[in-house]
Each structure stands twice: as C-alpha cells, then as structure tokens.
Image: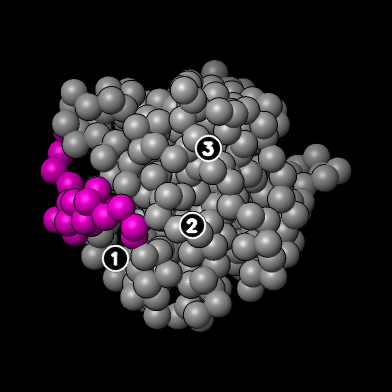
C-alpha cells in the first residue's frame, strides 16, 4: 500500500502577513517511491523580459518554508531579477508524505533538481539557509552551467568529516525525538522580532502532528559520518566549491546563532573559492533572513555587481590567454 500523502488546506495560507505571492506547483516530483504523487509548491516572481536578470533560487531549512524569504523576494524583484522559492516536500504548501521513512537525502535533492530542470532555471544565484544549503550546495557541481553565484546564510555542508557545533548537535537530537514539534513556539523563542501572526504563518503548514513527519525525518537524515547517505556527495561538492567554482559568492552570518555559530560560518567561507570574510549580521540569530530588512535593499544590486565583475574578469582572462 502506498504511503499516504497529506496536503494542508489552502485556507491555512490565506492572508499571511507579508506574503502576497501566488502559489505555483510541480506535480509528481521524483524522489518519493512508495508514496502517492507528491506535489511541490514554489513561489516564482519577477525577472520577466529582462535579459540581464539573474534567477535567485532560495532554499529554506528546517522547520521553515519559503515564508522565510518574504523580506528578500520583493527586493530581488525590485532590482529586476527573478526569485524562485520552493517548499521542500514535507514543508510549507508542498505535499507531506506521512511516514518519516519516505524522506531520504537523495529524494529531497532529486525534487530540487526536478524543479531546476522543469523550470529550466539558468543564471542561478543559489541562496541557502541551513538544510537548504545542506541539500542545495550538493547540486551545482552536477550542472555548473546553470549556476553563477552563491549566497549563504547560516548553513552546513554535511561531509561527515568534521564535528558539528555543539548547538547543532543538541538541536538535531531534540528534533529527532519530537513527533509534534511546536513550530510556532520555536519561532517565537528564537526570533523575538516576530509577531504572533508571523509565528502562526510558520505553523500554518502543520495542522496536527500527522503532517510533521519531515520535521522528524530531516534531523535523522543529516549526515554525521562519512558513511551516511549524502556524505560522499557532500564531500565531492565541497571539493568542487573549494577548487573549481568560478562564480561569485556572498556569506551573511547571523552573529547570535547558537546552532551554527560565527566560527562555523568563517570555516565554511574558507572552503568556498573566491569568497572573502562573512558579512556579519550583528542582531541576527539562526534564522538570518528574518533580519532581512537590515540587508535586503542591497542584495540584488550587490549580487549583480559581483556577477558583472566576475564575468568581466573571466572575459579578460580568456582574452589574455
């Protein structure tokens, strides 16, 4: 018998604060054998008709959804670029296989690759937070012709080859064991700038515990040793980021993050070719995009400037050769 696939009612997402975006869907994304068809939600805004537009692919982490990027999407569009923000299966408005065993590192990654290919996304700036980077940063080396840049918020590339920060270890242990994680309460405790309505928006995808299988599954899937599924792929990706990547990169670090602290972000910066020191977002905790009002007004323009400079450098290098 196929694993049940749950879908939160559309009215749970009505009139969310700061969220005017129309939903889009991909039907029957791959990666979930043994389940009924899984539909994946994404936001797709801006970029129409602009030959110089970049495509910002914004990937959320655990336990959030595309709502995390509500401050950033409008600024990307205002700068003339395209913003595509999917919800991972099990999160947001995407369908939710009810069995935690339905989720795999490879399956979640496959759903993102399917989105990129079906929408034929190009000139991609990969924007990642937490699990969005754990998964998303393993993709560009397999299709480098589609990617031009990287913007990292607090994230971790899970090679299994180095110890996790203590705060992240504690968080993974807590989330693995919690079948009914109170997302509203978690977001309220860790993001004092949020209103109750905004915290409720993070709870909206999860009417009850039966919808929360992914919240338990992802912490169990996190590669913590080199033999875990996803670790070898992450090792290959890390080598590519450090030795081969030739796009532009920015890293914005929440300086008050107890889960992936500043030292971990500085270490990540050292493993990405061409990336300088992280940009410190002094007031931000773990969910850095929630402090987006402090930096988003310049994000699209800064990315475009970095892209143009990098393109000019490569062109000059080619002519010199």
Residue 257: mark in rendering: 1
Say which residue label 3 marks. 5
Residue 206: mark in rendering: 2
Bin the neighbour count of mark 3 within 10 Å (Cα to Cα): few under 14, some 14-19, many 20 and up: some
Which contiguous range is marked in magenta? 161-181
Q: Residue at x 64, y 69 (%)?
A: 16
**Mark 3 vs mark 2: which is more N-terminal?**
3
Magenta segment includes 177? yes
Question: Where residue 296 sits in the image (x, y, percent)?
Answer: 57, 65
Judge left or right: residue 231 versus residue 112.
left
Bin the neighbour count of mark 1 within 10 Å (Cα to Cα): few under 14, some 14-19, many 20 and up: many
Q: In the image shown, does 8 or 265 lie closer to the viewer?
A: 8
Question: Where residue 261 sits in the image (x, y, percent)?
Answer: 25, 60
Question: Where residue 24 sits in the image (x, y, percent)?
Answer: 72, 44
Q: Residue at x 53, y 37 (%)?
A: 5
Question: Where residue 125 sits in the image (x, y, percent)?
Answer: 57, 42
Q: Residue furthest front?
A: 1
């Amino acid at each position: 018998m196929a694993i049940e696939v749950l879908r939160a009612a559309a009215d749970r997402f009505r009139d969310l604060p700061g969220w005017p975006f129309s939903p889009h869907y991909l039907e029957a994304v791959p990666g979930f054998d043994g389940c009924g068809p899984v539909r994946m939600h994404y936001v797709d805004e801006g970029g129409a008709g602009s030959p110089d537009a970049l495509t910002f692919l914004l990937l959320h982490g655990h336990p959030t959804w595309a709502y995390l990027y509500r401050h950033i999407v409008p600024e990307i569009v205002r700068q003339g670029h395209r913003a595509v923000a999917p919800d991972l299966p099990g999160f947001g408005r995407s369908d939710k296989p009810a069995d935690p065993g339905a989720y795999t590192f490879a399956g979640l990654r496959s759903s993102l690759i399917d989105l990129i290919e079906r929408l034929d996304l190009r000139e991609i700036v990969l924007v990642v937070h937490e699990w969005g980077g754990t998964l998303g940063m393993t993709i560009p080396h397999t299709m480098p012709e589609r990617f031009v840049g990287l913007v990292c918020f607090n994230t971790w590339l899970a090679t299994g080859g180095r110890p996790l920060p203590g705060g992240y270890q504690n968080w993974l242990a807590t989330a693995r064991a919690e079948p009914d994680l109170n997302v509203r309460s978690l977001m309220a405790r860790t993001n004092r700038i949020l209103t109750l309505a905004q915290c409720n928006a993070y709870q909206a995808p999860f009417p009850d515990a039966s919808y929360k299988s992914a919240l338990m599954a992802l912490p169990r899937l996190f590669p913590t040793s080199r033999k875990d599924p996803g670790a070898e792929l992450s090792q290959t990706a890390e080598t590519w980021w450090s030795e081969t990547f030739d796009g532009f990169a920015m890293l914005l670090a929440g300086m008050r993050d107890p889960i992936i602290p500043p030292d971990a972000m500085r270490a990540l910066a050292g493993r990405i070719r061409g990336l300088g020191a992280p940009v410190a977002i002094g007031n931000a905790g773990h969910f850095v995009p929630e402090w987006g009002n402090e930096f988003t007004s310049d994000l699209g323009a800064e990315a475009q400037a970095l892209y143009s400079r990098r393109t000019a450098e490569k062109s000059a290098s080619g002519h010199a050769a």
